[in-house]
Image (cartoon, rainbow, N blue to C red):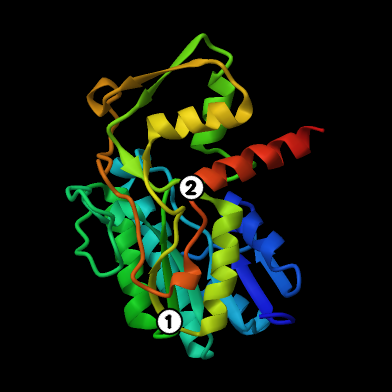
Amino acid sequence: MKNSKLFIIGAQGQLGQALQAQFRDCEVIAWDIQDLDICQLDQVRKAVKHIRPDIVINAAAFTQVDQAETHQEAAYRGNALGPRNLALATNEIGIPLVHFSTDYVFDGCQSRPYHEFDRTNPHSVYGQSKLAGEQEVQKTNPRNYIIRTAWLYHVIGKNFPLTMLRLAKQEQVRVVSDQFGSPTYAPHLAKAVSRLIETESYGTFHLAGSGGTSWYDFTQALYQASGIQTAVIPITSADYPLPAPRPAYSVLTSLQDPAMTLPPWEEGVRDFTTQLKEIKT
């Protein structure tokens, strides 16, 4: 992909910024919501035809999981209509589209990691809207990379580990211990994306931190890596009810090219804490 022209949408988010850092050897045009409303097909067509990129990477989404339950139209516009418009526009000029999806497309009822060919069955509006986006991209542009990831975080933005570090000023924190997933450090994901698009092997891929853990154990590892002594108290999902149902078990694995495998989630935690320390010094 060196010297290629990339059009990254959702540029100001944590994934968008990680992608920009990863593709420094490319010509990158990075836009966010103030530059382009992907829900407006005429805007999308005009932008793609004007920029004429080699590939479009869509890192934009409606990510407010709980708000999606009461703002269903907004969730479907951001997670299904927008991706459909991007798929139409990219297909019209014959270029690939990279689109990101989520572990929430699964119901979380099985006890082994989910691979790309497992049956989807989302229980939340957020998961349903993301699955609809996958389906729109698949049927509209055959040159698609649909990347399912999970529990994404970075040193910027709003995410779980940054929240836990802020709450560490308390004597103790209470964290859910009966939800399991695959924490994914955004720079690790961006690096895997760069490898994937070199293959021109289109399709659906699971790219997430290798292995699985609970929110509780994730917090324990984060505090240990950060030298934090705050007590972490395990609680159940029932102790911390939220509007949208979460998959109880949504660890992701891949049956695709092993070269695409991300580092273990523990390594992501270590790299995250190291980068935070570098920022503060």
- Residue 98 location, x and y as percent? 50, 72
Evaluate whether residue 32 shows in this view. no
Q: Nearer the viewer, residue 97 or 35?
A: 97
| Residue 196 point in image, percent of width and height | 52, 75
For discs 1 and 2, the disc positioned in front in the rendered view = 2
Q: Give the residue at x 74% y 81%.
A: 3
Q: Is residue 25 left or right of residue 86?
A: right
Residue 246 or residue 182, whichever sits in front: 182
Pointer 2 residue: 265
For residue 208, side relative to residue 50 (left or right): left
Location of residue 142 in the rendering, given as x and y in whole percent from the top left corner: 39, 85
3D distance between C-alphas at marks 1 and 2: 25 Å
Q: Residue lying furthest right in this view?
A: 281
| Residue 232 at x, y percent in the picture | 44, 19
The quarter of the rendered structure image containing the N terminus is bottom right
The quarter of the image holding the C terminus is top right
Task: Examine the rendering and report whether any part of residue 242 can be seen.
Answer: yes
The residue positioned farthest toward the top in the image shown:
171
Look at 35% across and 60% down and name the residue there: 253
Badge 1 element? loop
**Kind of residue at badge 2:** Trp
Mark number, residue 202: 1
* Above or below: residue 101 compared with residue 107: below
- Residue 54 found in image quarter: bottom right
Q: Are marks 1 and 2 in contact (CB under 8 Å)?
A: no
